[in-house]
Amino acid sequence: MKDMKNNLQSFSMIWILAAIVSSHLFSACSDDCDCLKARTSTDSDTDIDADTDSDTDSDAGEGCSSNVDCSEPTSICDTSNGECVECLVLADCAGWPGTVCDAGECNCPDDLEYCGPNLCVDIASDSANCGICGHACFGACVDGACADTWEPVSADGAPSARDYHVAVWAAELGVMIVWGGNTDLGYTNTGAVYDLETYEWQAMSTVNAPLPRQQATAVWSGTEMIVWGGYDGSVLNTGGRYNPTTNTWSSLSTVAAPVARRSHTAVWTGDQMIVWGGRSDANELGSGGVYAPAANTWTATAMNSSGVTRRDHSAVWLDPLGVMMIFGGYGDTPNVTNSYLPASGAPGGEQFNLSENMWQTLNAAGEPPSRASHSMITTGQDLIVWGGYNGSYLATGSRYTVSDGWIALAGAAPAERAYHTAVWIKDVEKMIVWGGQNSISGYLNTGAELNTVTNSWLDATPTALEGRYAHTAVATPDKMIVWGGLGSSGLLGNGGVYTPAP
């Protein structure tokens, strides 16, 4: 009995000491739940001194003796293994609802991907999270890729709905830049950069950005987007240069800049931007300027010998020839005013030789009928004109080469339209026409592909996006990205990516 009592007294002393230690630990850790999550170690506390040289910001797999040694995202110390981990028990994964604690990490079960609270999905087949979380498809997702020709542009972080904005494809960065235009709140100088690989938008800075405007032009220089001109209640002759890498704007010189205008064109030559035509507050223009970013200077273009002024025309740069080619539009000729072009002996097309600062009329034989608000693309060697309006909506077009002149397009063209977009997809050698407006269907969500090798129309594009006009479309090497515009529901802040078949 005496031995039992002595044993009980010893046990009582041990219990009291343990209670004191436990109370002290609870007091020290009651405000830090992570502290309570650390597993107790069978090693003596006296061994802790041996770890005083360890990094207190340990990552997973590095030594730790308590949660103090760990930091996010591996903020819990597994003292039995001396490793910082995300979790030891299921409760540690409460910040990621739907996950389980798996070998020290909070993961979705069955190798699924965590795409949000209680959203563990198979990104190889989930049409709302296809290939990556947040990447949606209009239809099925197969092997992590959208099965349809069209897929949506992400709406998360997208710019506000707008029309008459500008957009460029920055090939070196793999991003589309959208800026300016008309919103429900009026003209804007906001925009965003869309990464086609990550499906993410990044808002653009407005510090030092040009004034809000619509109907501006924009070109991509290889490092910057250069914006110029437009309309904010009055025409403008100012602009800006946006660097997406630094998210910064710098201004364009206004010294010797062309007169203010809208509905003009701009092309990039490789080291300079040529602005031409458009409309002032009073009349159509037949003047322009060449902007050199390296020197931040303007030089006036020579006046065209035809004396024709134009707005809502089209322009492309043909690098092998060193010329800007223009076609169509609405304006004045020496013989008539307020006319769709070509008209009354005035040429439909002209070319400007940059090195010689000289204009020349394009061969008029077989040229398309007069039109404005049409599309024109270049394959690098020639140009293709299609659609537009001349009092009626048009579904005609032609191809122009220096050697052969004008050649009509073959096959069944898409429905007549104006205010549409057209891009050339280099990898598959196709022109894609899409969207626009006509008197039959109003806002159009249709289009077609033209094989630029055979000069013939192919099948119509599938329908997916809401019909629209005054939108933008940019070309990547193998895709077309459409965004914004005006539809039957009003201004639009959405878009789609179209991938033509080889």
Image (tube, grey):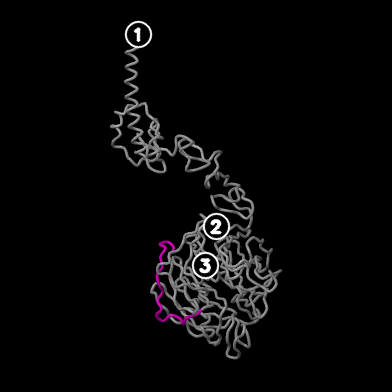
Question: Residue 262, image x and y in percent?
Answer: 52, 78
Magenta segment range? 243-261
Q: Residue 1: which numbered mark, if any?
A: 1
Instruction: From this view, report whether residue 386 is shown above or below residue 177.
Output: below
The answer to whether marks 3 and 1 mark residues whose Cβ atoms lie closer than 8 Å is: no
Closer to the camera in the image, 9 or 330: 9
User: Mark 3: which amino acid?
Assistant: Ala
Mark closer to the observer (2, 1): 1
Q: Going by the picture, which residue comes out furthest to the bottom?
A: 335
| Residue bearing the label numbered 2 | 154
Q: Quadrant of residue 454?
A: bottom right
Predominant secondary structure in magenta? loop
Question: Residue 429, image x and y in percent?
Answer: 60, 64
| Residue bearing the label numbered 3 | 167
Nearer-N-terminus badge (2/3) = 2
Closer to the camera in the image, 384 or 45: 45
| Mark 3 crowdedness (10 Å alpha carbons): few <14, some 14-19, many ≥20 | many
Instruction: From this view, report whether residue 46 is shown above or below residue 158.
Output: above
Question: Residue 439, image x and y in percent?
Answer: 68, 74
The answer to whether marks 2 and 1 mark residues whose Cβ atoms lie closer than 8 Å is: no
Q: CA distance from mark 2 to mark 1?
A: 80 Å
Q: CA distance from mark 3 to mark 1?
A: 94 Å
Nearer-N-terminus badge (2/1) = 1
| Mark 2 crowdedness (10 Å alpha carbons): few <14, some 14-19, many ≥20 | many
Nearer-N-terminus badge (3/1) = 1
Question: Residue 315, image x and y in percent?
Answer: 55, 76
Q: Quadrant of the N terminus?
A: top left
Q: Residue 38: which numbered mark, if any?
A: none
User: Mark 1: which amino acid?
Assistant: Met
Is residue 389 toward the left or the right of residue 262 in the image?
right
Closer to the camera in the image, 90 or 176: 90
